[in-house]
Image: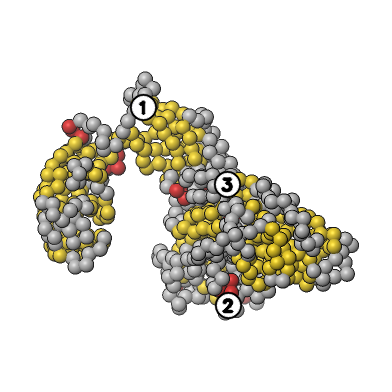
Amino acid sequence: MKWIKGLLLVLSLLIGLPLLLVFLLSRSSSDLRTFRWPGGELLSIEQVTHGSIHRFGPPPFIGGLKKVLSSLPILPSIEHYATSDSLVLWLTLEDTEQGFMIPLTNVVKVVARDGNGSRYISSEIETRDEKHWRTRPSWGGTQTPPPTSKWFISTVTLQQYPKGEDSFEVDLLDPYENVVQTMEIQNPNITQPSEWEWSPLPVEITHDDLIIRFTALTNTWAIRHIGQDYGEIPQFKPHFEYLTRDNKTAPYWLSDSGSAMDTFGNAVSLSGSDAGNLSLRSKTWKITYDFYRQAESPFPPDQVWELTLEMPEEGKSKTLELEKQLMGVPVKILNITGPKTKAVFKDGELESAEPAQGANGASLSSSSTYVGGKFVSTVTYTSEASYLGVHFPEDYHKYRIQLLAKNKNGDYVRLSSNSRSQHHHFMSLQAEPTESSVDLKVIVQPVFQKSFIVEPSITPPVHQFTKAEKIPARPNDVPPRAVDLSDYYTQRLDQHAHLIGRIGTRSYGASFNYYSVETGVHRINGQDWDLRGAVLMTGKCLYNFYLQYPEKIESIPISSKASKVHFLHGCLWPGHEGQEIGNYQVHYTNGTTYTIPLIYDKNIANVWDQPGETTVSEIEQATLVKLPVKEERKGSTANYSYHFTWNNPNPELTIEHIAVQSNRKDSAPLLLGITLE
């Protein structure tokens, strides 16, 4: 009998230990952190990976058992293809009531943020289900994965992120740019900065007989305009001067295709909002640009091709077999097409052309079919204007290829590529329909690239706001129950701040604009108010643009009893319904404190919304009021605020002071007045 017991023990170990190992391995790679989703679901960070292979779950040989024994309590082994210096977040969203996972389908953009104001934007989001974990299906944005699946995992790829930070915050955004969830990520791959030697501006670099002087680096990637009081702040861009050896201005030079890199390895193209993907904590940036000459510059004959082409009639296209080597670069003009034409090309050759009724602008569609043992590419291009079909070689980016057409004034105007399919570029001529021919000029020139290592031009915050200047004096006839906020105003009423920014490709904005409001003592909604400035607090809408307003004002003196406290307030930037964007803290002389939460759409809302909009009309505990103005402005929505009344639960106690707190949410709290009753 002992040998039977021994055999059973061995069998138990042989079966039980692998199952235990499988179960443990199914979770061993997890760095599980959970967050409560707005709908009540549970969002989990299952894992954060980096390196040449991004993998989730147990080793592949263990995960492979899932295919044979689908009932095993293990997660699949998944490999995700991303660059070696990127981070991949593995996220699950669990419906705890139903007991299964659901797809993360309403997240379309991810923004990683560090404590210095740098933002890193990504839209690389994929979701996989239990039946497709060996393949690479991609359900991004609002696309819904197969409804039969009960297990989903989403991968968020951060190509750029705060690589030098121990931890950083990540915002998940919906299609309307609302922040659905904010998560703190522990960085598993902290990068040490490169040691680059930099030179103070201006920096000069010599190329042949040309001297390029890098004179200035102006930035902000997000702020396009901040009213007259703050001055214009241009978008991020370098400024170059071009000089000859004898220090005279060298004409005809331009820069193009700029890129930048910080010392932590983040690299971006310099095209407006992308500049926000560089670390502002980096001591130096490497700015790299391509340089070339304008088309008006004199070029030697081996760089210029001049020709005249006959213009086809409307609805017709003509095949051309024109080719010329310029600087060793073969340029081919494939076809010329008349206006309002729909043309079909197969493998770059014209197949048919016909009139395009109602053609407006230009459109391109392409497809590839397998015919006769090979793939055949079909391109259909429809354009309202005449156009050229031009073929550039594969390495044409090493050169600057410019096509120009002579207009009716005799000037050569550069043509732009409206669309392209592989190397077939469609260049709009914009020629007059009555013209029978067009004079063309093709210019090819090599470009050269230079790098400059400089200090970042901006150390956030750009502007700090503590106490506003030039606030009107408090009138002598102010009722004593209207609290004096003179020492706490952070913004004048006539101090226009109009912020226009971007997240990815979507622009958005916010305005503080009370410049037509009449300052002084006014009776609004049954109460007297001292209306001379605004206590604007911080919020994401401001500090993400490097504008620093106070996060907390500790003590506004009251020294009085009150049965009610009236607040004239609002907020800058739309918020989320039910979200606490800040609070008032009422401090009594006996040492007790009462906190009044500021709940978006309950007792406070965005002052820039139209009065009829949902976010304003459904507010429950405050009254929308219009402020007195010096002059009416047609269509203006900037002169509104909210009157919120707080019933003091301790009217017998003296209120010593009131503190104002911002929770640094999207919306920035804005206080115009306090009146006691």
Tell me the amino acid under the disc marked 1: Thr
Q: Name the residue located 44 percent from the left edge and 54 percent from the top edge.
A: 82
Q: Secondary structure at mark 2?
A: loop
Q: Position of residue 583 (x, y in %)?
A: 71, 63
Q: Determine whether, in the image, residue 331 is placed left or right of residue 493.
A: left
Q: Determine whether, in the image, residue 647 is placed left or right of residue 236.
A: right
Q: Name the residue located 44 percent from the left edge and 36 percent from the top edge.
A: 239
Tell me the amino acid under the disc marked 3: Asp
Q: Secondary structure at mark 1?
A: loop
Looking at the image, is mark 2 or mark 1 nearer the viewer?
1
Tell me the amino acid under the disc marked 2: Gly
Q: Name the residue located 48 percent from the left edge and 55 percent from the top edge.
A: 502
Question: Any mark on residue 229, and which?
Answer: 3
Q: CA distance from mark 1 to mark 3?
A: 35 Å
Question: Any mark on residue 249, and which?
Answer: 1
Q: CA distance from mark 2 to mark 3?
A: 56 Å
Q: How is the image coloured?
A: secondary structure
* Residue that mark 2 sits on: 99
